[in-house]
Image (cartoon, rainbow, N blue to C red):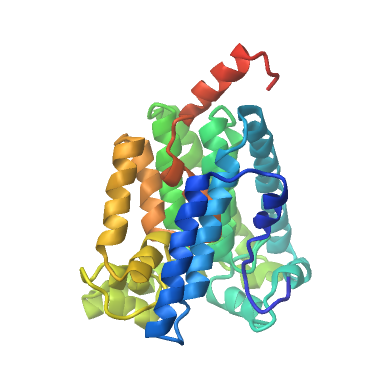
Amino acid sequence: MNLNNEVFPYFLISLAFLKVDLRIVFSGLIIMIIGSLWLFVDPNSRSIIDAAVLTSMLVGCSLFDRLKSHEKLKVVNVFTGFLLINFIVSVLQLVSPEFQSFTHLVFNAEYRSNVLDVVRGRNGGVTGLAPEPAYCATLVVGLGLIVSGYKPKRWFVPLLVIGSLMLLRSISGYFYGAVYLAFVIIQQNGSFRNLLIYLSYATAMLLTVVFLSNLTILDWARFDHVTSRLIHFFVLVYEYESILMAEEAFGSNRISSIFVSFSSVILPYYSTGFSPAATLNFLTGSALASVFIGLFLIVKNGRRLFYLLCLVLLFIAGPKLVWPIFYFALFGTKNYGGRNIVNRLVKNKVSI
C-alpha cells in the first residue's frame, strides 16, 4: 500500500483470534534462531528477514489448517469471490489504462513508482489486485488450488484462473498455471471433456486478447509482447546453452537463486532464495535441508501424483508470503476432492 515493499503478511492479523499448530510455532522459532545466527557470519545478509518471511508463510498455512471443516468452506467461498473480483478488475484494466493506473496506486511500492510502465512496455499485461503480474499470478493459482481442492465441482474456478493468467501474461504464472491445471484434471479423474473445456476457454481468451490488441485504444496491450519474450528467452537458452546465463541476460535471477541453493551440499555463503525450499537451503547452509524435508513430506502426505504436483510448487514458486500456493504441499491433500470434508459435514449435519 505505497510502502517501501511489495508484499506484507496482513494475514497475521488473524493471529488475534485464530489458532496455530504448536509444531509450527516451534519450527518458526528454530528458523528465526538460524536466521539470527547468520548475521554473525554476514551482517549484511537478509537472513533474519527471509526467516521471518518463511515463518509467516508457515503460520499462514497453519491458521487455515486449524480451522474447522465448515470454517474452511467459508474461507473457500471468500477465495472464490476474490478470484471473480480479481478477474473483473483485470478485464477492466485491459480495456482502460486509466483504471489500471488508478487501482495500481493502492498496490504500488513507493520505491518502484515506474513498475506499471515497465509492465506495460515489457509484456502489455495487467497487474490485477497485486503490485505486479507475477505476484498476482502466484496468488491466483494458490487460491485456485485451495478452491478446486475443496470444491472440485466449481467448474468455473479453473476458467477464472486461466482467464486471469492470460490477462496477467506472467511467464512464471504460466508455469504455475500448468501445474494447477494438471492438479485439476487429475482431481477430476483425467476427464478429457474437462480438459477440452479448459483448453477451449484458453484459446477463446487468446483470440479475444489478440482481437482487442488491434484496437487503437488497447495498443499498449498487444499480446505479441509476451509471446516474443517467451521466444526470446528460449533463443537465449539456445545461444548460451545455459538456462542460468539466459535468465541473467533476460534481467531476472529467480531461477538462478533456486538453482544455486541446490548447487552444493554445503553452501558457504548466504543468499536470498526465491522459493521456500531455496530459502531453507540458504538458511541451513545445505542443499540437503529441503531434500530431507521433501522426503519427509512425501512419507507423511503420500506419493500420489496430485500431491507431488503441489510439492513441486514448494520448490519453484514464490513469493513466499503467498501461503495458499504452498498449503497442500505442507499439510497434504487429505481433504482432496472435498470428499472427506463433505462426508464429515453431512455426518455432523452442517449445512454447506
Residue 78 showing in the rendered view: yes
Residue 207 showing in the rendered view: no
Above or below, 246 against 10 in this view is: below
Nearer to me, 189 or 49: 49
Image mark count: 0
Instruction: Give the residue displayed 54% in from the left and 71% down from the top.
Output: 123
Nearer to me, 7 or 10: 10
Instruction: Give the residue displayed 27% in from the left and 53% down from the top.
Output: 292
Instruction: Give the residue displayed 67% in from the left and 51% down from the top.
Output: 15
Q: Quadrant of the N terminus?
A: bottom right
x%, y% of residue 112? Answer: 64, 81
Above or below, 290 against 233 in this view is: above
Q: Is residue 304 left or right of residue 46?
A: left
Q: Is residue 268 left or right of residue 79?
A: left
Q: Quadrant of residue 272?
A: bottom left
Nearer to me, 98 or 280: 280
x%, y% of residue 337? Answer: 48, 28
x%, y% of residue 352? Answer: 68, 22
x%, y% of residue 340? Answer: 50, 22
Instruction: Give the residue displayed 44% in from the left and 53% down from the top.
Output: 176
